Structures are given as structure tokens and as C-alpha cells.
Amino acid sequence: MTTAGPAAMPPPASGPAVPASAGRDMPAARTRPERATLGSVATLVGVSRQTVSNVLNAPELVRAETADRVRAAIAELSYRPHPAAQQLRTRRSQLLGMRIHQTPEPTIFDRFLHAVTEAAAAADYRIMLYTAPDDASEIDAYDELVDRWNVDGLLLTYTHSGDRRTNHLQRKGVPFVTFGRPWDAARPHSWVDVDGRAGTEAATRHLVAGGHRRIGFLGWPEHSEVGSDRLDGWANAMSVAGLPIPEPRRCFNEVGDARVAARDLLDSQDVTAVVCVSDIVALGALSAADSLGLRAGTDVSLIGFDDSDKAQGADLTSLTQPLREVAEHCFRILLHQIDTNNQGTPPEQVLLPPTLALRGSTGPPG
Amino acid sequence: MTTAGPAAMPPPASGPAVPASAGRDMPAARTRPERATLGSVATLVGVSRQTVSNVLNAPELVRAETADRVRAAIAELSYRPHPAAQQLRTRRSQLLGMRIHQTPEPTIFDRFLHAVTEAAAAADYRIMLYTAPDDASEIDAYDELVDRWNVDGLLLTYTHSGDRRTNHLQRKGVPFVTFGRPWDAARPHSWVDVDGRAGTEAATRHLVAGGHRRIGFLGWPEHSEVGSDRLDGWANAMSVAGLPIPEPRRCFNEVGDARVAARDLLDSQDVTAVVCVSDIVALGALSAADSLGLRAGTDVSLIGFDDSDKAQGADLTSLTQPLREVAEHCFRILLHQIDTNNQGTPPEQVLLPPTLALRGSTGPPG
DNA sequence: GACCACCATTGGATCGATCCAATCCCCAGG
DNA sequence: CCTGGGGATTGGATCGATCCAATGGTGGTC
């Protein structure tokens, strides 16, 4: 369900029917919770503010028995440090910046955003959004974010060759991680990415194991780095299997264009299976097969990439990007940079393999 | 393009080729910008901190000539107040909270998120994200957000009848606005929504004006409030036009299910046009028409809802939700509540009409 | 027993802004 | 000439945390 009004049809969790946990009553009555501070905890225990602070930030300095009493008081008053006060003193904000890109339609980036928000929340970090019309003004926005808001780190997406943003951030010494490889050999920085090549390789191997011998590839135009990577995986698996490599077809990432290209591929090349560079493209292939009277899963096998909702809806085998893991790695690496003050440790790179989600378009399950 | 890796094919703005504005050199050389503070501005001008503060927050207290000198110094040092310090003193954070919902696939909510981020940035507010598995724990999250992070206001989405969140926030006195109507007659609060009924009405009128007399409706199952609203618009327009009202067909918001329902509608009811409750459903109808040998735009007219990228790709006439306006209204109302301390003015409601984006599925343009 | 090292704890200063009350200045009114 | 009122400006206290240097108490050593 890509769409529909804000109160779209199936409410995206816990419907109105659920009565919500009943046994929460204690704090409901209070009119003014009267925020607890370091000081109030300290006087309750009978120690100084600094001792309370140490219990939280440097427990090894505090005698165990004292620490226990402090912790009890913290729990009793349900004290939590005030972020603004901390930030003022420490120059740390517990905030991570993330740019929202202007895309015609939402992408898996949005799922990534969700996963990162959750991963960060577990460590008491929050995501602050910002916008920028292009990379150039994004660089301008960094100064604002870092100098004024004390954002602790940045998560970049949509990296591309010739990306100026990473250089700028390295020069400024701001901790950051990118989701996506730097596609040119720039100064190395930390990144996390999904191994598209490994994905299409696995997909192709799966088809080969299923008995296919003529397997085509439906890709994007040449200049796409992500696209070439995925194409390479298919080509490599084919050559490893000792199979002939049909000329790949290319199209834009739209169903209509993909349908035309796919029809051509199915017609002229006589393939029995097609590995597609994306789900969108695979949907076009599905439609093309349909119009040629070929049934997906029996007459021809199709595999997409991204395991989007559309793939699930169309019963399309696809490659699942491990977005939760990507998000967790991104956050872990970023947190490490922040904690070590961005020094000492070399940049870290993580490449995660997608997994094949088998569905009807590659034959009956089992 | 719903998908593809993080560095997806067409980079979503400014490609690598663009050399980025060349003429920015001044601040690049400095090693340590040495943040300007109220105090440094004050000593430069030769006035007290408070006067500088007044220039920014209460200009009417300052003599015009003094204010000008202060403003000049502010510009020279490129001073900007430190949010953490302000927040500590004023209990205002310039932050708005927004929950990211767990949706299987991104929705127009993500476009809304973008629009809100931009609207807020113009007034120096930022969006902070949070997650919650369901409405109940979302309510828990409010305490954290409001008490600890001093979030100034909240933007809620996915309202539904029986929504407990709004009551809770009203009790706490936290400023908030919802994108979406409260579908039951709860205590009134501020909201902004898109008038689905007016949209389908306009769509139907357009079809009637084009000469159609048998116009069907393809909707969601009965329990959807948004769905009923959109159905009502169609039914009303039909009855106003004095046309017979065919039995509406209902399906889930998936292409596959919609195709089945649409085929039935096109077959048995002999309609020449179909108003659809969403783009997804309309795509199903498109596919059904195709399989029946009917060409969209000539043999049968189809209209979707949301004007998603899919609609644009499929050359489908659809109803555009004015998300930018929705976002701007939401922010404006929220800001007003914050500024007036959430008192005095009654809640404000805004209902915005969608606009019809005409494409090939309702006949040749012009 | 005096001395020192060491651990646990403390008090005061500080981050950068705003709040509040006090002060200064100038001019009209008596 | 003194007084009072009001606009413009100022200094000090404050928000809630951390940083830093100093203090109190304990035990070991000569």
C-alpha cells in the first residue's frame, strides 16, 4: 500500500479496537511532574551533585555502596538528565543529522530512515531532519547543523562518484557514515552498503541450480554505478557456470520502459529466466511476459531487486536488502567515531549481502 | 522509481557533473571559527548582552540607532544564538516531534514529511523523529519528548476513530496538529486534511462533462473512513447529475485484488468510466481493462487518487493531494499554538481540496 | 607519629542564553 | 532648582548539567 490518505486503510499498527494497556495509572493523576534534576537527586541521597553525575558518567570513581543509593534515588524520582544542559556544557547533542531527499516517490531510503531512528533511539540518540535542494547547499547546511545545533554526526545517503560532501566533512572533522559506497577512489571514509553484485550472483546461481541455461539481464543505462555492479554479479555467475552470456538489455527505472525492453529480451534472445536490476524493472518484465502469453514461474522465471511491497504483491522473487542491519551498522560505526572523537581508528567499511526472497515468479515453492 | 540501492540510478538532484558554486572561499581557510556569542557581539558594539538579546527578541525596547549597530555586528560576526542555551533558559527547543510509522512500503506520508521539514526550516524549526510500535507506546513516548527534550509541538498522522493520542495530548496541554480528521466526534482539536469527497466529486463531474453516463466506483472495504468519504463524493456527484448509481465494488489496496474487482465491475456493470479510491486500485483497474481488451482513455476512462509516481508512470489521471499546502498549514497552526502558549484561540481545522491531474487514462489531452 | 599516596567526595566556575530588577538619562512640570 | 516619570540600558541571577581543582578520610611506610 503505497498510498492513500493520511488515515489510510489498514492503520499501520494497532487498530482502534485494541484497548491499549489498561494497567497504567500512577503518573496519570499528577498535574505537575516537577522535573527532577541532578540537584534534587543529590539532596535526596545526601551527596553532592557531582557524585550523582559521576554515578552516571564515571561509575568507577564512586564507591559501590554510594552508587547504589544514588541509583535508587534516580529511579525513585525517575530522573533523566536534561539534554539541553548537557549539550551546553559538553557540546554533545545526542542528535544525528539526516537529509531528506526530494524524490518523486518514496524509496527504500524511507525504510532505512525508520530503521536508523530505531537503532539510534536504543542508545538515546535522535534523528534530526534537514533538507537541501542539492549537494552544494547540503554542504552549507552542515555548518548550521554542526556549529549551531551541535549535531554529533551525520548520515549521508545517495553517494555518487565525485561526491563533494564527504571531502568537506572529512576536512571539518565531523563524524559521518554513508549508506552507499563512494564509487570513485576518493579518500576512504566509513560506509555501509549492500552488495548488489553478490545479490545478483546468488539470484543467478539459484536459477542455474533450477536448470535454467539461458538467463538474461535487464539493467539500467550504462552510467549507473549501482546498476553496473548488479550486472557484474549476473555476468560473473553466468561465466562461472560456463553458460553463454546474452547481451543485457537496458531501460530506465519505469515499468513502461522496462516492459518494452523485456519484451525484446524475451522475444529475440529466447531466455528462460531474467534477472532484473530492480523490482520496478521486474514488474515491467512481468507485464511483458504476460502480454506474450508466458506465465511467470512456469514458462519464464523472473527475479527483482529490493523486495519492495510491489514485489510481494506481484508474487515476485526478489533480493531483500538487509536495511535493519545496514542501519545498525551505520549507527554503530557513527557512535564509535563520536566516542573516539573521530581519531585513531581507521574508517570502517561494511558490505552486506542481500538475501533471496523466493516467490512464485521463480517456480512453485518447495 | 520506488526503489533501487541507496545510490539509486538518477541521483535525486544535482549530479556529479555540477561543479558546485565556485566563489566561496572566505570561511574555508579558517581553522577554528570560534563561535560568536551574545557576549562577543556585545563587546564589539560596546553595549551589554541584554541589549543584543533585546534587538533579537524585543526590538521595540531598543533605540533604532543602537539596534542598527548591533545588527551590523551580528552580521559581521555571523552570530546565531545557541539553541541549547536558549532551550535551557526558555524551555523552548525549536523542535517538533513526528513519529515514523512502520509501513510495509513508504506512503505519501513520506512526501508530507519532506514538506513539513521544509516549512519548519523556514521558521528555524527542526523535525525530530521518533518511533513507536503502536499508539499506546507512542503515548508513552510523548512524556520523554516533551519533558526531556522540550519538544515544542507534535505532528500526528494516521488518525483514526477512537484515537487515544489526541485526548492524552489535550490533557497534557501539548501543542499538536494532526494530518487527518478525527473520524469520530471527539473533543475538537486542530487538524488539516484533504477533502477526499470533494476530490472524487470533481473527478466524477469531469467524467460526466466528458459525456460518460455509467460511471463506476472501485473502493476499499466498508470499514475505512477515508474510503467511505471518497465513495460519498462519487455517489453524490452521480446523484446530482441525475445518473444511475451502479453498485460500487470493493477490494483491498493491492493491484491484484483490485484487478479482480475491476474486471467484475467492467464486465458485469458495463461502465464506461471508473473512479478509483487510490492509485493502486486504479492500476489494478488499468490492468483489468487491458486484459479485457479495453484501451484506457478511449474505451474506458480511469481516475486514481494520490497522484503518486505510479500514476504518472502509468499515464493515469489522478487526484493530487496538496501536500505542500497541508504541511504549511500544519506548521502554521502549530506555530500559532506554540506562540500563544496553546491558549485563547479555538482549535483550527483546514480541509483542502485535491486537484485533478489529467492524463491519458481519461482521454486524449486537450 | 609524621608523612605521603590514594580514593571518594565536594564546592565553585562555567557553557550561552534569558529573566528580572535596578539604574541611568533626559525632559516636562511644579 | 528639585522632582518624577518613562524610555533605554545594564548587571546579576538563573536554567541544569559538566569541568576542574581542592578537600577529607583512610591506610601504608619509615
Image: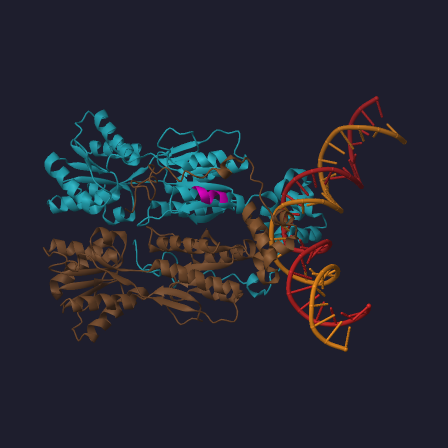
Chain colours: A cyan, B brown, C orange, D red
Which quadrant holds the C terminus of chain B?
bottom left
Q: Residue at 14% of width from left, 37% of height from top?
A: A265
Q: Residue at 69% of width from left, 43% of height from top?
A: A65
Name the image quarter holding residue A68. top right
Relative to B289, A185 lies left or right: right
> Residue B115's spot in the image, x, y percent?
38, 55
Asked if A319 appears above or below B227 in the picture, the reply is above
Is residue B18 rendered magenta in the image?
Answer: no
Q: Can the viewer see residue A54?
A: yes
Asked if B330 appears above or below A159 in the picture, the reply is below
> Residue A30's spot in the image, x, y percent?
59, 64
Relative to B355, B273 lies left or right: left
Observer-nearest residue: B244 or B351?
Answer: B351
Q: How many discs appear? A: 0
Q: Which residues are magenta?
A: A139-143
Relative to B235, A95 lies left or right: right
